[in-house]
Structure formats: structure tokens, C-alpha cells
Image (spheres, helix red, strand yellow):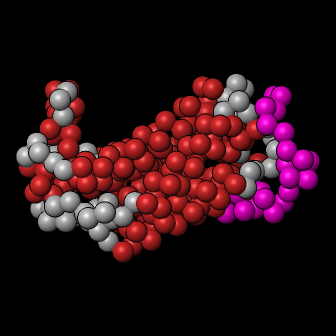
Amino acid sequence: MEIPNIHELATEKTDSTTISYFLLRQLIGILGILLPFALIIFGGRLQPSLSHYYYSFSHTIFIGTLAALSTFLITYKGEYRIENWLANIAGVCAAGVAIFPTNVKGFIGAKFISLPISAESSHLSNALHYGFATALFICFALFCAVVFQKPDKNEIVDDKKRRRNRIYRICAYIMIFSILAIAFLSIFKNLDFPYSTLIFESTTLLPFGISWLLKGSYNWTHSRYDIIKILIKPLR
């Protein structure tokens, strides 16, 4: 897919390539924002982590969303080499999180999905799951901290771009803090508190989703809805 010129978006006429390019960014963002809410709302009992919803009524949402994210990220093509590498790595990691479930230990309530006991308690599957999840979250943070702050093709770095970069940095800081908090509490378990992993996983996904939505918001200035034009005006 050819990366659209930013000046092509100065008019309301955009071709299907331009529209699909930014729509892909928006879809990735929407999935990131909706995933925690969808799992919690449809999963029945509140679980200690998002990963534990693999065994709940939200199993299909968990697997389906990660599969969609994996597909979108792998097929995503950006302008910078690091952008493409991060997207590919994140796509593979999203698939890995879905394929290798976390240990069932800690799951609350009656299981909706049952696996062989050997699979549910597999140390290898658990290690792979958290390895892929950690790498995935790091990739998400790097998108905000490095990639998204670079200007797109022929993009002018003006005040609006600098405002967007501030938002990307805030999103990166929140994600980095959340990742470190999960790691810290997994080591110092005496300081852990109920649903801490669920909370910090969610506070990693939400800024990830917001940053991708913002990155794909070029065509919002030509939206048919006035409220969207008003909201995006300070940033686009």
C-alpha cells in the first residue's frame, strides 16, 4: 500500500488507498480501547487479569480481538522501517498471547472454556504468554515514545503536531508506568492488591488505543459530524 501524501488530505476527495490507510490506524485504536471494556462487561465475574478472560464467557472476544489486532498490525505498512518492524513484532506477539493461554490459576468462577489440565497448568504456555504480552506492551509504548512523534510523509511540524506529540508522550508515560507496575508487583507480591494486573493491563491498552486513533485522525477534519470536527480542530 502506498503511503498517502499528507497534502492529499487537504481536500475532501480522498482515494480508497488513503481512506483505508487511516481507517486501519483507527481500527487498531478502537480495538485497543474496546477490548478491556468488552471483556469485563461480557466476561461474567471480574478476573485478576485480562488474560484470565480466556477461560470466561468473553473467550471469543479475547481471541477474536487479538487475532484482528495481529492481522491489522502485520498488514500495516508505515513510512519508517522501525514502524514496520514494530508493527510486525507486535502482530506476532498478539497472536502469541492468543495461542498460548495464561495459567488457569487465579481464575474466578466456573470456567466457560475447559482445556486439558496439562495445558491449563503448563509452565511453558504461561511463560510464553507473559513473554509475548510483555513484548507486545513494550512495542505499544515504543510506537508512542518514538514512531508516532516522527512527522508523516510531507507533514509540517506545526503547533498542532507538537500538541499531538505531547499526547503521544503522555500515552507513552502511562504505558511505561503500567508495564513497570505489573513487573514490580509480580516481584514484590506483598505490595500487590486485588485486580492490580487487570487495572494496569487496561491502563496500557487504553492509551495505546487513543494514540492510534489520534494517529489515524487526518480525515476527521472532513467528517460529516460537526462534533468530530470541533473535537479534532485543536490537533488537526
- Report if residue 102 lies within the magenta region: no
Q: Is 80 displayed left or right of 185 in the figure?
A: left
Choose between 65 and 161: the one closer to the eye.
65
Question: Horizontal and vertical percent for residue 112?
Answer: 79, 32
Q: Is 153 displayed left or right of 144 in the figure?
A: left
Task: Identify whether 89 is placed above or below 16.
Answer: below
Dividing the image into 4 quarters, which one contains the N terminus? bottom left
Q: Is 109 displayed left or right of 76 in the figure?
A: right
Mark yes or no: residue 169 visible. Answer: yes
Choose between 169 and 82: the one closer to the eye.
82
Question: Horizontal and vertical percent for residue 56?
Answer: 73, 33
> At 63% across and 26% down in the image, what residue appears?
42
Q: Is 112 displayed left or right of 212 in the figure?
A: right
> At 47% across and 61% down in the image, what residue appears?
74
> At 59% across and 61% down in the image, what residue appears?
93
State which region is magenta: 109-131
Choose between 48 and 100: the one closer to the eye.
100
Residue ranking furthest to the left: 11
> How many dots with numbers?
0
Question: Horizontal and vertical percent for residue 86?
Answer: 45, 67
Q: Report which quarter residue 195 is drawn in.
A: top right
Residue ranking furthest to the front: 16
Task: Identify whether 114 is placed above or below 79.
Answer: above
> At 32% across and 71% down in the image, what residue appears?
80
Mark yes or no: residue 193 visible. Answer: no
Residue ranking furthest to the right: 117
Question: Horizontal and vertical percent for residue 69?
Answer: 51, 50
Task: Identify whether 29 is placed above or below 130.
Answer: above
